[in-house]
Image (cartoon, grey):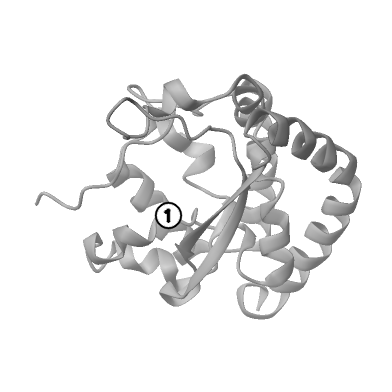
Amino acid sequence: MYKKYIKRGVDFSFSFVGFILLSPIFLLITLFLAIANNGKPFFFQRRPGKNGQIFKVIKFKTMNDKKDKDGNLLSDAERLTSVGTFVRKTSLDEIPQLLNVIKGDMSLIGPRPLLEEYLPLYNETQKRRHEVRPGITGWAQVNGRNAISWDEKFAFDVWYVDNVSFLLDLRILFLTFVKVFRKEGISSDTSVTMEKFKGNTN
């Protein structure tokens, strides 16, 4: 009952109130990022949602668009601005996604929405992560976030799909605040962001 009827109402209520309460911080970060990124504080990206339907996720733009002499974007680490570093470490870059939750594209808790280009790379089990709305935070995030492998991440996502409950969502929300406070799992072992998923090798 919770998964089918109640979860959406909880998402909308908490996201709406949360966005109102966080609006002063939202406006302040928007101002600083607009200065750091030449008037571009946000970026919009197509992501698969529930049942693989595409929507545009909104996030704070924590990296600039600087390129090398050949016109290629510099590495993530080189493009990450000082303001962006702070916003990422405190997970404040997720605030704009409350608007996606209010719209109904996302949930507060669920598998993170990944890149559209990954869709044809999933095996049948991994595809099941799209049986629920993607979330701002999720079971994989509180179990390692960017510091775990793709196989582990997908296993956590599918486990969540099979075990959605109000108590589990509360547990994930609590653990998310703990992880943010401790600044755990923000980067992988080799990058400031998670390496791209290249498909299954077996």
Q: Nearer the viewer, residue 48 or 72?
A: 72
Give the quarter of the figure containing the N terminus: bottom right
Residue 75 percent coordinates (x, y): 37, 27
Asked where in the image residue 149 lies, by quadrant, the reply is top left
Q: Is 30 left or right of 153, judged from the image as shown?
A: right
The residue shown at (41%, 50%) is 156
Give the answer, above or below, for where 18 lies relative to 192. below
Residue 85 percent coordinates (x, y): 59, 23
The residue shown at (37%, 25%) is 191
Asked where in the image residue 12 lies, by quadrant, the reply is bottom right
The residue shown at (75%, 30%) is 32
Q: Is 175 left or right of 192, judged from the image as shown?
A: right
Asked where in the image residue 93 lies, by quadrant, the reply is top right
Residue 138 percent coordinates (x, y): 55, 50
Residue 125 percent coordinates (x, y): 28, 65
- How packed mark 1 is, by other alpha carbons closer than 10 Å (few <14, some 14-19, many 20 or more), is some
The residue that label 1 is drawn on is: 114
Q: Nearer the viewer, residue 2 or 28?
A: 28
Give the answer, above or below, for where 118 lies relative to 142. below
The residue shown at (66%, 30%) is 87
Report the label total.
Answer: 1
Q: Nearer the viewer, residue 200 or 65?
A: 65
Q: Is 60 left or right of 123, judged from the image as shown?
A: right
Q: Nearer the viewer, residue 87 or 91?
A: 87
Identify the secondary structure beneath mark 1: loop
Amino acid type at mark 1: Leu
